[in-house]
Amino acid sequence: MSSDKTHIFGPVPSRRLGRSLGVDLVPFKRCTFDCIYCQLGRTTNLTMERFPFVSPQAIHDELAKRLINDNYLDFITLSGSGEPTLCKDLGRIISGIKELTDIPVAVLTNGSLLWDKTVRQELMNADLVVPSLDAGSARLCQYINRPCAGFDFEKYVEGLIAFRREFNKPVWVEVFMLFGINSIRADVKEMADIIAKIAPDKVQLNTVARPPAEDFAMSVPENQMRKLAEIFSCPVEIISNQGEIHRGISVVATCDDVLSLLHRRPCTINDIASGIGIHVNEASKYIGELIREGKISSHVVDGKSYYQARQESIV
Ligand code: SF4
């Protein structure tokens, strides 16, 4: 069980969740899926086995410290460097956060473990759950999500339906659209029929915006996304190409990459993200580590926070 790692990152500005503080619950990159579009790269530990990766107390202590300095948050978002429901203490972690603060808790999950009553139960204290569904058939799910051995598409869908029935707070289903793969009308209709049975509060249509695990996972143009949105019977929100990471944190760069950029010029989090080609979540996480290590300083110019390397950190 890890205790020395930083589990809290951000806050990051999120179009979907406002100002959101992230909680990273699983080690990189442990997931039940190995999606062709994953921005974290290929899954290195493809598993359905749940494990107590982090102690709830460590998360709560770290979060309590963060909330002393920053309480103006729209959400505390549980995600991770993979699939957060693989964290066995998820329920205790959520309950403890609810005791610490009134800030709503969101969970971004691929939904693959929702067939498990225990997992569904552990999510009951969350305020918003965003599971995903990228395919209307087992065949397409296998191609796009490349699930762990033992995964059963029918069970997955039943889990999503059961969770929606039991969870009386908002559920948004995220669909990742891929050009020429699941963006064909007949395939979208099949998926929309399943989503109608789930009956989420809304569907979020997302597409590739960051480098995917596989080159052939390509984005769907926004005008096509708008046409496909009409196929769904529940409210649809389109997350455009400027949209956000689909769960988890990209871990492509290193702290040294960020430090090296900040040696060259002061940057905002967004400058770092676009400068190195990483997601703002990942940039925020590295910034937090570098500040704690005393290697960088921050100052505010025109309402924006800029980060700069300290001279003594130049090697
Ligand atoms: S996109 Fe999400 S569900 Fe798919 S492999 Fe990446 S972390 Fe796992």
Image: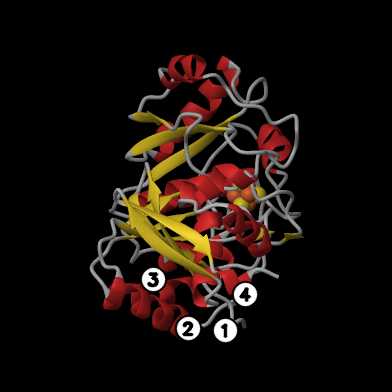
Q: How many marks?
A: 4
- Return the residue at label 3: 94
Mark 2 residue crowding within 10 angstroms, few (<14) / some (14–19) / many (20+): some
For disc 1, the neighbor class at 10 Å (few under 14, some 14 to 19, many from 20) is few
> Mark 2 falls on what kind of element?
helix
The label on residue 58 is 2
Q: Which residue is mark 1?
A: 3
Marks 4 & 3, CB-CB < 8 Å contact: no
Labels 1 and 3 touching (C-beta < 8 A): no
Vertical side of 277 occupied by 124: above or below? below
Q: Residue at x 25, y 62 (%)?
A: 72
Q: CA distance from mark 1 to mark 4?
A: 14 Å
Residue 9 in picture, x, y percent from top left: 47, 64
Residue appearing at x 33%, y 58% in the figure: 75
On whether ligand 1 comes within 8 Å of the CB at mark 3, the answer is no
| Residue contact at pointers 1 and 2, CB within 8 angstroms | yes
Q: Are marks 1 and 4 in contact (CB under 8 Å)?
A: no
- Mark with earlier residue (1, 3): 1
Cα distance between the residues tagged 2 and 4: 15 Å
The answer to which of marks 2 and 4 sits earlier in the sequence is 4
- Three-letter code, disc 4: Phe
